Amino acid sequence: DIVMTQSPLSLPVTPGEPASISCRSSQSVLHYNGHNYLEWYLQKPGQSPQLLIYLSSYRVSGVPDRFSGSGSGTEFKLEISRVEAEDVGVYYCMQALQTPRTFGPGTKVEIK
Amino acid sequence: QLVESGGDFVKPGGSLRLSCSGPGFTLDNAWVSWVRQAPGKGLEWLGLIKSNSVGGATDFAAPVKGRFSISRDDSKNTVFLHMNNLRTEDSALYYCATGPPCNNVVCLAGAGPSFDFWGRGTLVIVSS
C-alpha cells in the first residue's frame, strides 16, 4: 500500500498570509501517462470533506484561486496564497493511483 | 447530493447494512467509494464498487477485506455497504463518495474518479 505523510500536522495561520502544506507518498503516484494521481481535500469543522485539487494541480470548479497544488512523483504541496478565516479545517492529501486509496493523516489549519 | 443511512448501535460480531442513495443524482454510471472517520481521527478509505459498465468489480482495504462487501442496485439508485463481524474499532462515521463517470483513459488509469460528491455520513457504533 502507498503510505501518505503530511507536514506539518498543525498549522496556525494569520489571515492574509500565505500557507503551505506538504504531502509525501511512499511510492511515486506519477503514472506513465504523465499525470500525478494526487488529490487534496478540505474538511471544514462539522462538515463532510470537499475536493479542492485533483491530479496534483487541477483546481475544482468553484474553489478559490488562492488554492494551488503542485508537485510530482512523491512530493506534493498545497499552497494558499492568502489565508482567509473560512479556510480553517483539516486538509488531507490522498493518492488516487491505486487501490487501496490512502489518505494522509491530515493537517489542521487554524487561525492564530 | 448523496445520502447515507443505516447507521446504528450494534454489538461486536454483529452485522449492518449501510445505504448510499443519490436523490437527484444518478449513481448507475458512478464508481462509489466508502470512507470512514473514527471520532477525532482522520479519513480512511474502505472500498469501492465500479460501475456496471466496467464490470461492477469491488475492491477493499485490508482492515475490512473479507468482512465488508459492497453491492449496488441501480434500479433503486442505491449502493450498499454490507458489514459483518463488526468490531469495536469499526465505530465511525461512514461516508459514501463518488465523482464524475470514470469513462476516460485518465480516470481508468488510476483508482477511479476523484471524490467530488460526499454524503453527510451515517454513524456506526460497535459496543457491547
Image: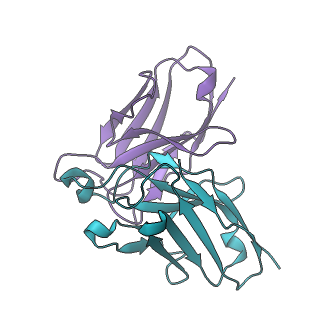
**Would residue B72 appear left or right of B7 to someone viewing this image?**
left
Residue A33 screen position, x and y as percent: 16, 50
Residue at x 26%, y 68% (from the top left corner):
B54
Which residue appears at 32% of the width and 69% of the height?
A: B52
Residue at the top extreme of this rendering? A16
The image position of residue B8, as x and y in percent, is: 74, 69
Residue extending furthest toward the front? B75
Q: Does any portion of residue A13 appear in the rendered image?
A: no
Q: Is residue B89 visible?
A: yes
What hue does chain B carry in this figure?
cyan
Residue extending farthest to the left is: A33
Check the image and tell me how it is coloured.
by chain
Q: Residue furthest right?
A: B128
Say which of B5 and B62 sits in front: B5
Report the quarter where the C terminus of chain B lies: bottom right
Q: Taking B28 as reference, is B77 left or right?
A: right
Report x, y in % for residue B63: 54, 74
Tag count: 0
Q: Position of residue A46 (x, y in %)?
A: 69, 42
Q: In purple, which chain?
A: A
At 32% from the left and 53% from the top, the residue drawn is: B101
Asked if residue A58 is positioned above or below residue B61 in the image, the reply reads above
Q: Nearer the viewer, residue A9 or B89?
A: B89
Q: Is residue A6 left or right of residue A97?
A: right
Q: Is residue B6 above or below residue A59?
A: below
